[in-house]
Image: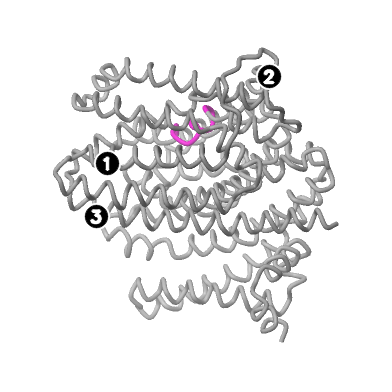
Amino acid sequence: MKGQGGLARRSIVGILWTGLSMGALAVAELVALLVLARLLSPAEFGLYAAALVVIKFSAIFENLGVTPAIVQRPVLEVRHLRVGFTLSMLLSLAVSAAVWVSAPVIAAYLRLADLVPVVRVACIILLCQGFSTVALASAQRALRFRWLATLDACAFAAGFIVVGPALALLGYGVWALVGALATQHLLRMAVLLLGQPHPKRPMLELRAAADLLYFGGGFTLARICNYLATQVDRLVVGRWLGADALGVYALASQVMTAPAVIIGQILDRVLFPTMARVQEEPARLARAYRSGVAACALLVLPAGLTLAVIAPELVLVVLGPRWAGVAAPLQILALGMLFRTSYKLSDSVTRATGVVYARAWRQAAFALAVALGALVGSRWGVAGVAFGVVAAVAFNFLLMAQLSLRVTGVRWPEFAAAHLPGLALAAVVGAGVWTMADWLRGREVSPLLLLLDVVVFALVISLVVCWLLPAVFLGRDGRSVLGLLVSLAPAWLRRGSAG
């Protein structure tokens, strides 16, 4: 029991630190981009964005899943670390060389002649990631979440708050952005290699390489399919509905998926290495998965319903009246927020248990479902595409849940029961938010004031009903997570809450 509580506490602390880090990074990134936007031209930002797309796509093939393979290994030997380091270096060099050579072709295809040197210099990012991937995997395996969160924040600050603006002020144009990105990754690589030592003597052993690449191959296949699933709906909208519709849909999708992606990344960064530790203990793995599903439903279901209700005012305040068409697809996509977020938990548990090829074909089916849903939905415009995509995301949620239940031993009735407190809370909050928003609209309250009133009301009603009826609106898993959070609070706060 002590080990169970200790690992659960470390997971909660890891989620808190990772969430704090990613939240701070999101704010810092927004501030840095606003500052740089005043110093650089749209064309320079465009070149940087194009180069980043190339680098991010190339990174999928950079180490063929060596990092998660090291984290997932039930028994990790020195030879795995040495072979993993060697493979990562060789693969990053090969991918970097391929991008360097193909840079003119990429630039010609995108009709951006100035892109060639930018892409070539940005290849340093691939090298930094390749050389530090084993150190990163070792730190994740050791559950050093606080250290990794601090490192990410400091590296970003050095690159985009110090170096980037300084280079922009000196007139370096797009190279200010490239320099900021390079500084961030070089510093991160240096600290990872120094702060998380591991054997670095090159080694190529066939059996160890096969151990890593078997898992890594399935991971990479799933990653490619998932990448296609996140992009194919935009291709369908652009091809069949035109540029204006694509702008509306892309913005609605970005606004909705941003919080879901952030929550999913926070959970995945912590739960994947944590679940990998207990992959051979089915009872603990099942308990962790069920608690994660319940907590996700408690957070995301009320938030999704609230976002669906206030979407028209949110669009007016944030984007302006000419983007009013974003509201309808945003409302539809918001209703599917749980499916998009919760499947990340299933993703973590399936990777932690090594069933990567079963995961890969499900991600391929997901990409196909998104394409089909978007294509059929396009007959009814952007809103139809949004509905088709939500149906595809729900299909993927069920596919991944089925795989997770298989590997954890959790039964479908238990899985459904884990969602009941979140559904009950969402019903109460949703009804209250809908009533209040309708009342405020009838009195022609300003959109900004309506947003503030509704969000505060949603938070207050959630806290009140959970305090009055915790058994109904938190459930067993929610109360367990809350108990862990309270145990992490300072002693004076615990005394106050008990009083």
In the structure shown, which secondary structural element does the residue marked by tag 1 occupy? helix
Residue beneath disc 3: 35
The amino acid sitting under disc 3 is Val
Q: Are marks 3 and 2 in contact (CB under 8 Å)?
A: no
Q: Is the magenta stretch mostly helix, strand or loop?
A: helix
Q: Quadrant of residue 363?
A: top right
The mark found on residue 177 in the picture is 1
* 498 with respect to 47 (left or right): right
Q: What residue type is labelled 1?
A: Leu
Mark 1 → mark 3, Cα distance in angstroms = 12 Å
Q: In this view, does 22 lie above or below 57?
A: below
* Residue at the top extreme of this rendering: 206
Residue 251 is inside the magenta segment? no
Q: Which one is earlier in the sequence, the residue at label 1 or at label 2?
A: 1
Image coordinates of residue 230 in percent, x first then y, are: 47, 36
Q: Name the residue under label 2.
A: 208
